[in-house]
Amino acid sequence: MRPRISCRLVLCAALLLAAQPVAARAAGDPLEAVNRRILAFNQGVRARLLGPLAEFYLSATTPEVRHGIANALANLNEPVTALSGLAAGDPGLAANAAARFGINSTLGLAGIHDRAAAMGYPRQPFGIADAVCHWGVPSGPFLVLPLLGPSTLRDAGARVGLGVALSQALGPDAYAAWIGSDAFIGYAQLHEELERIDAQSLDAYAVYRSAYLQRRAAACPADRAEEPVGETEAGPEPP
């Protein structure tokens, strides 16, 4: 899952980012004006719809139930990880994901329990965007997608391509139900932290942008040279 950090760290990051000149923050961010408007839209949807739904979900379920649901949804992503690993030329990663899917789908009761990890097959999330990154495709400009949140031109393109392929393979309704459930569960897990960032940071956009770009740079060697100078440690990006 995405790392959680303390509220104090989020505030420090926001203060440092906000202290930078606006022109410096905008460097390498040609879509900032549009991104900020989309972020404002996303924040409105979170405040009026997703936030109340997430609070109801958190209050109506136990941590054990939420953990099982998250595990089951993560298990559905293992075939994507396997295919992405093959595309990136990493058969070991692909084999690990395939083994996890087989073990957890059976012994783990459709993935509710992560039996594979206890058997020496740890979860190693890896998506098609990571494979494209390993091909050396540059990230392109930072984007904020409606409802889906932070991305880059490359990552958004990979997501769209994967979505089209899965929609054709599974059917539009099944794919929409899967991806919608996965996105909502991911948001619910970060709901309280995202609320704190929006309420306490001087520039939530800068915090989210920094968090996403740093996370991608950590996962994708090709992105490290593109990482903006002066970006600081920040909180998680909104889903």
Image: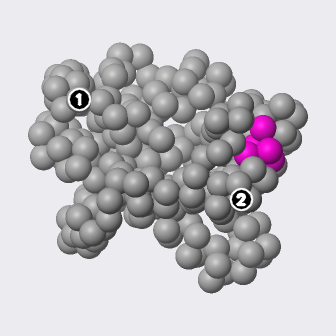
Q: Quadrant of residue 39?
A: bottom left
Task: Specify the principal SS of the magenta part.
Answer: helix
Say above or below: 137 vs 115.
above
| Gap between marks 2 and 1 measured at Cα | 34 Å
Say above or below: 142 vs 79.
above
- Please provide the residue range marked out in magenta: 96-100
Q: Earlier in the sequence, mark 2 or mark 1?
A: 1
Image location of residue 212, percent across then percent down: 44, 37
| Residue behind mark 1 | 6
Say above or below: 117 vs 69.
above
| Residue behind mark 2 | 105
Along the viewing direction, whichever of 174 and 115 lies nearer the viewer: 115
Image location of residue 99, percent across then percent down: 80, 44
Residue appearing at x 74%, y 39% in the figure: 131
Three-letter code for the amino acid on which mark 1 is drawn: Ser
Three-letter code for the amino acid on which mark 2 is drawn: Ser
Image location of residue 50, percent across then percent down: 30, 68
Residue appearing at x 44%, y 22% in the figure: 228
Element at label 1:
loop
